[in-house]
Amino acid sequence: MDLLIHTLDNGMRLVHAPAPGMVAHCGLIINAGSRDESDGEQGIAHFIEHMLFKGTKKRKSYHILSRLEDVGGELNAYTTKEDTAVYASFLRDDYERAAELLADITFNSVYPEKEIKKEKDVVIEEINSYLDTPAELIFDEFEEQIFVGLPVGRSILGKPETVRSFSRKKITEFIFKNYSPDQIIFSSVGNIPGDKILKIFKAHFGSFRAGKKEKQNSPLWNYKASAVTKKKDTYQNHCIMGNKAFSIRDDRRLGMFLLNNILGGQGLNSRLNLALREKNGLAYSVESNYTPYSDSGSLSIYFGTDKQYLEKSTSIVNKELDKLCSVRLGTIQLSNAKRQIKGYIARGYENHENLMLSLGKSLLTFDKIETLEETYKKIDAITSSQLLDIANQVFDKSALSTLIYE
């Protein structure tokens, strides 16, 4: 992939991937998420994501929303525990319109007090809706359980009491600390000439102040396995079990992704889906997830089942974990597992919006971008012995935590 990468004097970086088609995508990937929040700020990174659409020095909220929608484009955003993304999809002829809008809402938003007051109610309703959805809530509460007392374990949405405390002053202070240009990537995919991309990038992002986000020390993580059961007014029992796992910079990360995909990834032929759902009809929803962070990570296994089948379902999950810990994958099994995950990666590359977000995240995290061929080479190098070692470390029964809603 022939990438264009450029750094402005203020430290902001550009990565652009040429791609065919009438539609282009661009976005800002910002190194600021919920784990950057201090005490009393819980939920402010996500709240700012909402407020970016509420008015700038030259635009009202309606004009922000209409700027791209009037020409058939779309403006969107999300917040994670470690980053925030503001991005757009549009016809390639409207590229500069999109880039200018992203610059305006990210660096020139004014956060009107009237809009802050309204948006607090919206976000609190979002929190309440989430609390009414146990199949989603259990993931947040499980991360709080294994990252006990640490910012990375907190819910991205925050709590109603912290959201109510947000003011324009708190918002601008968080932005000043975290939204410096050297911590932001402008990522782009589309059929746009490189010289035009550079001209637009310099024109709309080059004037913003340089800054330097203070590096935070990684907190001490004294993980201890725990088992928690909570009473909930639900028809099903919801169960999640898991352990700490590897950071995004750990050499074992790709092996963990591969192992997680075998166990309960997106494929319907995952071991957990076959064992719990297809063979025994015990669960409709079953999955496993590996989430790597910059200095830590988590592995979780989730399923929802009828109350009378909880014990049987848990036993089946444990049997599948035992197999991964005791039996090496055969040559054909390992080859098929690698082909499957390569296919998922390739499909992600073919989705140009996903590619744009992935390129920005990679450059922000690693200061480089691997080619698809380089990633495949690393996957091909994974051995069954390495997977066995990873399984025995992460699926160690004495180290697994559980959270059950009953």
Image: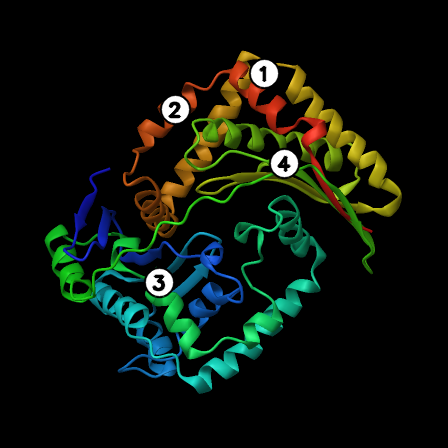
Secondary element at image label 4: strand
* First in sequence: mark 2 vs mark 3: 3
Does the image show residue 108?
yes
* First in sequence: mark 2 vs mark 4: 4
* First in sequence: mark 4 vs mark 3: 3
Q: Nearer the viewer, mark 4 or mark 3?
A: 3
Q: Mark 2 and mark 3: span between their CA atoms?
A: 36 Å
Specify whether 132 is left or right of 6.
right
Figure label count: 4
Q: Position of residue 395 (x, y in %)?
A: 65, 28
Q: Position of residue 303 (x, y in %)?
A: 72, 43
* First in sequence: mark 3 vs mark 1: 3
Q: Which residue is mark 1?
A: 329
Does the image show residue 74?
no
Identify the mark at residue 177; answer none if there is no mark: 3
Identify which amino acid the numbered label 4 is placed on.
Asn
Residue 126 occupies which quadrant of the picture? bottom right
Identify which amino acid the numbered label 2 is placed on.
Lys
Q: Mark 2 and mark 4: span between their CA atoms?
A: 25 Å
Identify the mark at residue 378; answer none if there is no mark: 2
Q: Residue at the location (53% across, 67% down)?
A: 40
Circles 1, 2 touching at the beta carbon (< 8 Å):
no
Rendered-image quadrant of the N terminus: top left
Q: Mark 3 and mark 1: span between their CA atoms?
A: 48 Å
Q: Residues within 10 Å of mark 1 (few under 14, many from 20)?
A: some
Secondary element at image label 1: loop
Q: Mark 4 and mark 1: span between their CA atoms?
A: 22 Å
Identify which amino acid the numbered label 1 is placed on.
Leu
Q: Which residue is mark 4?
A: 243
Q: Residues within 10 Å of mark 4 (few under 14, many from 20)?
A: many
